[in-house]
Image (cartoon, rainbow, N blue to C red):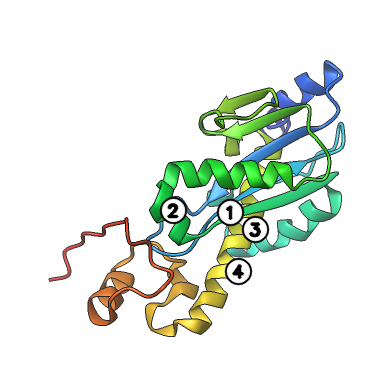
Amino acid sequence: MKAQETDRLQYERRLWSEGVRFVAGVDEAGRGPLAGPVVAAAVVFFTGDHIAGIRDSKKLTAKQRESFFPVILRRAAASAVGTVSEKEIDRIDILQATYEAMRQALSGLGIEPAHVLVDGYPIPGLAIPQTALIGGDDLSMSIAAASIVAKVTRDRMMVEFDRLFPQYGFAKHKGYGTRDHALALRRFGPCPIHRKSFTFKQDLT
């Protein structure tokens, strides 16, 4: 277990050793759901910092993510989130909306990172040097921390939306295409936070 945790610092450690002080990890939450915004987070840690147990947010329970969330915010040199609404997703498509949320998160840090580690593919139009890592949320502590911040932030937003639109069960499924969500859509039709450009097909018989 210890070796795995140390491994998640390999990219940061290399950059720190080259004199790169501020390394930002970037990830998103909410590309796949049928409703709600896409949220991205950027997190920068101080050189040499390490939070044991951080990993891809999808491999943590909701309770574990909530536990890590304040620790990350307290320990980070800087952190920020970017949010793109479902209406903007429909206008520019989910991929471009994801990149826009990532750029927003980076611009909101308050410090300018010298290098960006991003989960997935390179962020278009970014002037800062970046390294794109497929599966980066389980390879880099900074990206993993960003994935947790993005996921917890978005989940809390969906709980708030559940209070506005309780018939859809957003607090439970967070807008993803579950059977219960499909049944609610069939019964009530879409609400204002549903992504009109997304389609959902599931056998409900």
Write down the residue under mark 4. Answer: 156
Up-down relation of residue 105 to residue 35 (above or below): above
Disc 3: CA contacts within 10 A as few (<14), some (14-19) or many (>=20): many
Earlier along the polypeptide chain: callout 2 or callout 1?
1
- Of circles 2 and 1, which is in front? 2
Query: Closer to the camera, 47 or 28?
Result: 28
Q: Residue 135, percent across and down? A: 52, 34
Give the label on residue 65, or none. Answer: 3
Earlier along the polypeptide chain: callout 3 or callout 1?
1
Query: Closer to the camera, 174 or 48?
Result: 174
Up-down relation of residue 40 to residue 165 (above or below): above
Amino acid carrying mark 3 in the image? Arg
Earlier along the polypeptide chain: callout 4 or callout 3?
3
User: Which element is circle 3 on?
Assistant: helix
Earlier along the polypeptide chain: callout 2 or callout 4?
2
- Of circles 2 and 4, which is in front? 2
Amino acid carrying mark 2 in the image? Ile
- Of circles 4 and 3, which is in front? 4
Disc 4: CA contacts within 10 A as few (<14), some (14-19) or many (>=20): few
Q: Which residue is rendered at x = 69% and y = 37% of the image?
A: 25
Disc 1: CA contacts within 10 A as few (<14), some (14-19) or many (>=20): some
Image quarter in which the C terminus is found: bottom left
Q: CA distance from mark 4 to mark 3?
A: 12 Å
Disc 2: CA contacts within 10 A as few (<14), some (14-19) or many (>=20): many
Write down the residue under mark 2. Answer: 89
Image quarter in which the N terminus is found: top right
Write down the residue under mark 1. Answer: 60
The answer to whether one can see residue 59 in this image is no
Q: Which residue is rendered at x = 40% and y = 47% of the image?
A: 93
Circles 2, 3 touching at the beta carbon (< 8 Å):
no
